[in-house]
Amino acid sequence: MRRLSAIGALLLICVGVALATTLFRSGKAHATGPVQSAPVPTADGKPVKSKSSTSNSRSLTLEYFNGSDDEKFTEIRANAITVQGDTFGHVIWLFLFDQGQLVMYFYLQPSERVVLPLPKAVKFDEVNLENCFGSTQCFAQVNLIGS
């Protein structure tokens, strides 16, 4: 009798493990699968361009190495900004300009990430990684997202 109940319990555990791995595996495969975007048609049937594919956006990686890193580009109007501080543990100063005039700056702690939606579009044409406290080298990632 004991043997029969032990076999039943073992069988129940095996079925539970098999079912759980099947469910979790299919969920994981779905979550990590390739992203497929389909164009969304408008009322006239023409596809709409994705906002992330606009030419009015910039993604920049700046590197400070014994001096500032300055990136100049054609002026864009950004509706949102994301900045990622140095992931190696350094505090940084990051400045954003328009025609040589300071528009905003960020004082970022190590690995700090800021996502900043803007109430109206703001013009930018330059990003400067100015200081890297505690090291002669650090990095920053800046995304200026336009409409």
Image (cartoon, grey):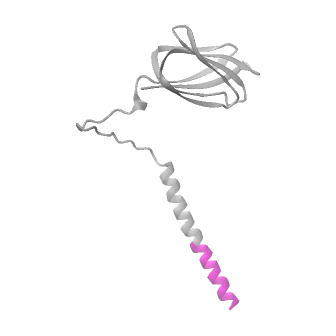
Which residue in the rendered view is the most extreme toward the left?
A: 44
Q: Quadrant of residue 44?
A: top left
| Horizontal and vertical percent position of residue 33 | 47, 49
| Horizontal and vertical percent position of residue 140 | 62, 24
Q: Is residue 51 left or right of residue 17?
A: left
Majority secondary structure of the magenta segment?
A: helix
The magenta region covers 1-15
Residue 28's place in the image compared with 74, above or below, is below
Residue 113 sits inside the magenta stretch: no
Q: Is residue 12 left or right of residue 118?
A: right
| Horizontal and vertical percent position of residue 71 | 55, 15
Number of labelled discs? 0
| Horizontal and vertical percent position of residue 19 | 54, 68
Q: Nearer the viewer, residue 111 or 138?
A: 111
Q: Residue at x 64, y 24 (%)?
A: 139
Q: Quadrant of the C terminus?
A: top left
